[in-house]
Amino acid sequence: MEEKKIIFSGIKPSGNLTLGSYLGALKNWVDLSDEYNCYYCIVDMHAITVRQDAAQLRRRTLEQLAQYIACGLDPAKNTIFIQSHVPAHAELSWVLSCYTMFGELSRMTQFKDKSAKNADNINAGLFTYPVLMAADILLYQADLVPVGEDQKQHVEITRDIAHRFNSVYGEVFTMPEPFIPKVGARIMSLSDPDSKMSKSEQGGMGCICLMDSPEDIMRRFKRAVTDSDSCVRYDPENKKGVSNLMAIYSAASGKNFAEIEAEFDGKGYGDFKTAVGESVVELLRPIREKAEDLLKNKDYLVQIYRDGAETAAKAAARTLRKVYKKVGFVER
Ligand code: AQP
């Protein structure tokens, strides 16, 4: 029997998971989990590149695990684990940082964005973030990395690092490919359709979290920024707000853009926003309820992340051993 191809992906517990995290990442993770051997991680080490409150980070990490499972990730089929539980991530990251150029890290869009937003804490970790991400992916010899559009550049630098290492030492790392969903790859803020819906920018009217109440979700959709021409038409250049709502509606309802345009032909934005809001409420309701249930059973969650770390550590150790040997470290 042919061996299953490997997937790695992760999300930082830097805020509560959003509709963007779900449509851009988690939904696809679930779809891919039958066909691939999947490693799905909670990347807590990435989260501390921006200052976090320790108690909140710990709480969010567990909540995120519950939400992964509630979104449909079956722990029996997928390796679900916490990044800091597998030390090989930090170890490989150091080695790879010696094969990554200062210039290439300086070109990363996310570094530029995050350093502008955190001007008082432009730490080295924020700068070397893509190296740790490369280590995450390459440790598991991943073939595919399902991510939203915003993370494509980080998968590309991972390929460059892998290529550089392989050209010195032979085929040590599998070349990973990004896997970007057709719909939902970049969900924008409801209050500012020019910026991405982000976990770390919660609290305003622009962000929908997986655990939000139906009332909050409806209120935010009803206030979503659109435009003044009252026509539901997909035009991401000129009608950013409406096109974002259409992408959300399409992902939540399964309808394509032509069907959505026909459905709201001659109707105002009020009806449209209500329909989008209701479809998201129904999409998220079972996820929220299941996550709330799971969070009542801490022992179960602990068992899942311990088992996950054990499986992940075995796979990671194989790659790390090979890398250490190639670069010339004496065997323990
Ligand atoms: N708005 C989005 N639309 C589509 N996909 C998205 N993703 C995140 N936001 C959207 C995808 O979800 C995964 C989460 O990655 P992450 O948490 O490690 O990094 P991120 O992209 O930096 O996520 P956030 O929510 O913006 O977090 P903060 O605010 O902490 O930086 C990735 O696959 C991402 O593409």
Image (cartoon, rainbow, N blue to C red):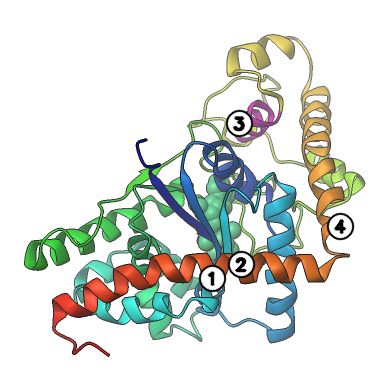
Closer mark to the observer between disc 3 and disc 4: 4
Residue corresponding to mark 1: 310
Q: Which mark is residue 307?
A: 2
Q: At 55% across and 40% down in the image, what residue appears?
A: 28
Residue 4 in magenta stretch: no
The numbered mark, 2 or 3, whose residue comes first in the sequence reads 3
Q: Which mark is residue 292?
A: 4
Q: Where is ligand 1, by quadrant? A: bottom right
Residue corresponding to mark 3: 247
Closer mark to the observer between disc 2 and disc 3: 2
The numbered mark, 1 or 3, whose residue comes first in the sequence reads 3
Amino acid at dot 3:
Ala
How many C-alpha atoms fall within 10 Å of the one at disc 2: few (<14), some, or many (≥20)? some
The residue closer to the viewer here, 21 or 218, is: 21
Q: Is residue 163 above or below residue 52?
A: above
The residue closer to the viewer here, 63 or 187, is: 63
Task: Check if mark 2's residue and mark 1's residue have beta carbons within 8 Å.
Answer: yes
Q: At 66% across and 63% down in the image, what residue appears?
A: 201
Q: Is residue 88 above or below residue 73?
A: below
Q: Position of residue 299 (x, y in %)?
A: 80, 71
119 vs 249, left or right, is left
Amino acid at dot 1:
Glu
Residue 295 seen: yes
